[in-house]
Amino acid sequence: MVRRLAWSLPPAVLLAAAFLYPLALVVRQSFQSDTGGTSLKPYTAVFASAAFRQALWTTVWLALAATACCLVLGFFLALVIAFVPFPGAKAVARFVDVFLSFPSFLITLALLFLYGSVGMANGLWTEATGEASGPFHFLTTPWGVLLAEVTYFTPFVMRPLLAAFSQLDTAQLEVAASLGARPARIVRRVILPEALPALAAGGGLVLVLALNEFGIVLFTGAKGVSTLPTLVYSKAILESDYPGACVVAVVNVLVSVGLYGLYRVVSRRAGA
Amino acid sequence: MLVHNRAGKWAVWGLFLVLFLPLFALPLLVILAASFAGHWSGALPSGFTTAHYTAATRGDSLQALTTSLVTAVTASLLALAVGTWGALGAHALPRPLRRVLDALFVLPVAVPSVVVGLAVLVAFSQPPVLLNGTRWIVILAHTVLVTAFAYQSVSAAVLRLDPAYEQAAASLGARPAYVLWRIRLPLLLPSLTAAAGLCFTLSMGELSATMMLYPPDWTPLPVQIYAATDRGRLFTGSALAVVLMTATLLVLFAVARIRTRAAYR
């Protein structure tokens, strides 16, 4: 027993030194004011700033909205691939896997070409109407971030769903249909109950990823959109305000862990 | 299976395409098109050129690609070693202790990577270990971020290992180290390569912690892409992005080939 414990210790010690110790230092620094000594001053200063409250609210609503949209969209797309298959549906499923191996900021980069101020959509509009500029300016608002997050995170919902659907016995669907159930009813009464665990797992993953997303927000380049992770970055690197950055970091971790815990409780209650 | 009449099927497929093409296929196509475009001010790109690729494969950009590759390979190998050791060690422990180890190794996933970057920056800019300004601080942060995935992947595979093989080997007198080297690791090889691919992919695309940490002489490709787009050089950024995607996919493909050969053995 002692031998086994000794053998499993080194990796745990390494991880603790490279991760837990730094995290503890962040918490410690968040309680240190510029003059030194322990105080709550960084917290009161950060909580009093309007920029922080704005970022906190933006982070939370963006993550919740992205999770909801990804669940609906991912469920529909996976449903079609699995149960209304078309030629090439397998290739689409594989494309989704490839999609997952690309970094998130590529989506924002692509959206700049599509909906940016000189992008494709605005170009089409000005060519068609002859006006000086197009109507699409949402990219530098939270809506642009939401669109990018929904695009990037939906595959994270589709993958567990497709795995779950592949294990669902299609005879159940045939029986339900032969007994006269319409597609909407089959989806609600047969497929949805089977899919709930996978849906809950995918949704939880998306929620955490969206709360912690950084690249998408950074690449929109919008000064107006700021979330907790980008606030940590701008406070630490651009303003060199380390106590402030540490406070935002602590709040960000607490919000992520807290919302994820709440999500798990709610989804268990819902029967997943 | 679900929709039986023809019109209904076509309606569902139509809706699928309307949602799927603009949301998922179009962004990747647009990046590919933009990387070859001379300018793009109207509906479609024009003035096709390969100049962006010439720029993307020399000088700073080539440096950024090798930086990314070296960082990702080093971080993946370190994470694989620590994660595999951790998973094998945890498996031998009684359940409560294993739970603690599981939680410790999975925790970095729940913590935002920007915060991991900040933590590493704060901790290793002061004694006893000074890494700030070196490439090692970037590699360390990447290792911390991907170790969780290596651990999860290997620990799921360890649970599925048939203990009969190692018991047979041990009953024939093989020492634990020999059993580990000749029985357990070869059986784990498919999940090890899968974990390596995942770790490599994540590290190649890592931006958030890297932005907090990178020294001027160690800028990985994602940072280079950000720098290009931030200065308004979107076409160069797209070419760099295509280089990043291609490099990632090539390595993933190579790793997948190792996996099939291991599975046949």
Image (cartoon, coloured by chain):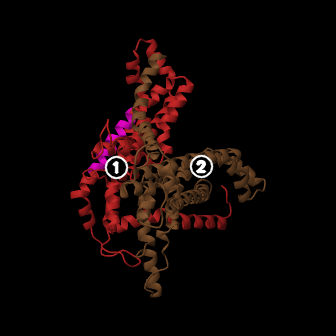
Q: Is residue A186 left or right of residue A39?
A: right
Identify the magenta region. B66-81
In the picture of the structure, the residue carrying the numbered disc 2 is A259
Out of A78 and A228, give the one closest to the viewer.
A228
**What chain does badge 1 belong to?**
B
**Residue A248 at what x, y percent from top left?**
48, 52
**What chain does badge 2 belong to?**
A
Q: Is residue B68 magenta?
A: yes
Residue at disc 2, secondary structure:
helix
Amino acid on which the number 2 mark rests in the picture: Leu
In the picture of the structure, the residue carrying the numbered disc 1 is B213
- The image quadrant where one finds the N terminus of chain B is bottom right
Q: Residue at x 43, y 85 (%)?
A: A132
The residues bearing labels 2 and 1 have C-alpha atoms spaced at a distance of: 28 Å
**Residue A269 at what x, y percent from top left?**
70, 45
Q: Residue B147 carries which label?
A: none
Out of B139 and A47, give the one closest to the viewer.
A47
Most common secondary structure along the magenta stretch:
helix
